[in-house]
Image (cartoon, helix red, strand yellow):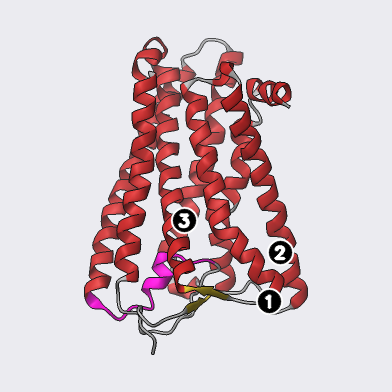
């Protein structure tokens, strides 16, 4: 069996064996990727060009758009290529790069979602301290910490996984190179236990962020319910609920994909879940996050 030093390529999981469905998947992914590129591209242009959008909230939205574009550009193009040409292969180097960049962008995105939750918490619960707690230097440090967290996680997991001895074939049960599926091909016990340790550390970090998000929203909802006017409560809820919905979708599908029982596991279910947490959020974020913002819509209109 091939090992990690001699393996030339991996086999990805195909969406379908029927040519008609393969073409359908290609056009579906093309539409999703174009929507994500258009939406996030408009946001990047508007925030960069309009001085009125140089606020902490829009600063983090700018970075979130970068992570969304990164996620889409990492996984979707290869899936579209395979669906269009009826292939399932990806080179060893391409698989390593895809695994690294996907984990890099996905961890950075969750870190940014946590920071954006803090931004909403300060804006609603401590509005008088907003300028102090979220100054330019503080925002830059938090954004840098989010990107550094993603880079460090991706580097450690990818280096450990691809330095392990792979002897269980080269077929991955996923439409893109994801580290847990690559690790299933390993027969190196030391590499496996190292990865378990890294996963445990990352899970603790993600759990801490989730606890912080839950605690922040409890405080936010308590503060919103004390707002005397119904219009004020509605405005505050409208700014928080889309963020909470995206975090819930992002976290729930990822957790269920990792912790689902083997008895309910199937290739179609795995593909559906992976699309939900890797492709759908980057395409929907511009719509439910940003394009509902009147100031951002006006800035996009003025820019173009």
Q: Residue at x 35, y 14 (%)?
A: 132
Q: Nearer the viewer, residue 242 or 295?
A: 295
Q: Does residue 216 appear to the left or right of 38 in the view shown?
A: left
- Residue 287 placed where, x, y %? 65, 37
Residue underneath mark 2: 26
**The N terminus appears in which quarter of the rendering?**
bottom left
Cα distance between the residues tagged 2 and 1: 10 Å
- Residue 175 placed where, x, y %? 56, 68
Residue furthest toward the bottom? 1
Q: Nearer the viewer, residue 66 or 115?
A: 66
Residue 267 marker: none
- The residue range painted magenta reads 176-189
Q: Pointer 3: residues within 10 angstroms few (<14), some, or many (20+)?
A: many
Name the secondary structure under disc 3: helix
Residue underneath mark 3: 102
Name the secondary structure under disc 1: loop
Q: Earlier in the sequence, mark 3 or mark 2?
A: 2
Q: Residue at x 38, y 42 (%)?
A: 147
Name the secondary structure under disc 2: helix
């Amino acid at each position: 069996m091939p090992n990690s030093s001699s393996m030339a390529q991996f086999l990805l999981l195909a969406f379908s064996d029927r040519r008609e469905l393969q073409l359908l998947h290609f056009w579906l992914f093309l539409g999703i990727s174009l929507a994500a590129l258009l939406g996030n591209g408009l946001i990047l242009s508007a925030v960069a060009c309009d001085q009125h959008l140089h606020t902490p909230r829009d600063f983090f939205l700018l970075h979130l758009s970068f992570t969304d574009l990164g996620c889409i550009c990492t996984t979707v193009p290869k899936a579209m290529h395979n669906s269009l040409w009826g292939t399932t292969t990806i080179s060893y180097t391409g698989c390593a790069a895809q695994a690294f960049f996907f984990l890099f962008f996905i961890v950075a995105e969750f870190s940014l979602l946590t920071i954006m939750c803090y931004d909403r918490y300060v804006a609603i619960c401590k509005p008088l301290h907003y300028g102090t707690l979220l100054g330019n230097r503080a925002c830059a440090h938090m954004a840098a910490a989010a990107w550094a967290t993603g880079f460090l996680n991706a580097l450690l997991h990818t280096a450990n996984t691809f330095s392990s001895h792979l002897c269980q074939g080269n077929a991955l049960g996923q439409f893109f190179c994801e580290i847990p599926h690559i690790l299933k091909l390993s027969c190196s016990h030391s590499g496996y236990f190292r990865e378990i340790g890294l996963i445990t550390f990352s899970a603790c970090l993600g759990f801490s962020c989730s606890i912080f998000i839950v605690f922040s929203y409890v405080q936010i909802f308590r503060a919103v319910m004390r707002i005397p006017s119904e219009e004020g409560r509605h405005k505050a809820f409208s700014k928080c609920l889309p963020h909470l919905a995206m975090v819930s979708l992002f976290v729930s599908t990822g957790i269920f994909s990792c912790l689902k029982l083997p008895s309910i596991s199937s290739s179609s279910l795995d593909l559906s879940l992976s699309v939900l947490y890797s492709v759908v959020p980057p395409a929907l974020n511009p719509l439910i996050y940003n394009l509902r913002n009147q100031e951002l819509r006006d800035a996009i209109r003025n820019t173009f």
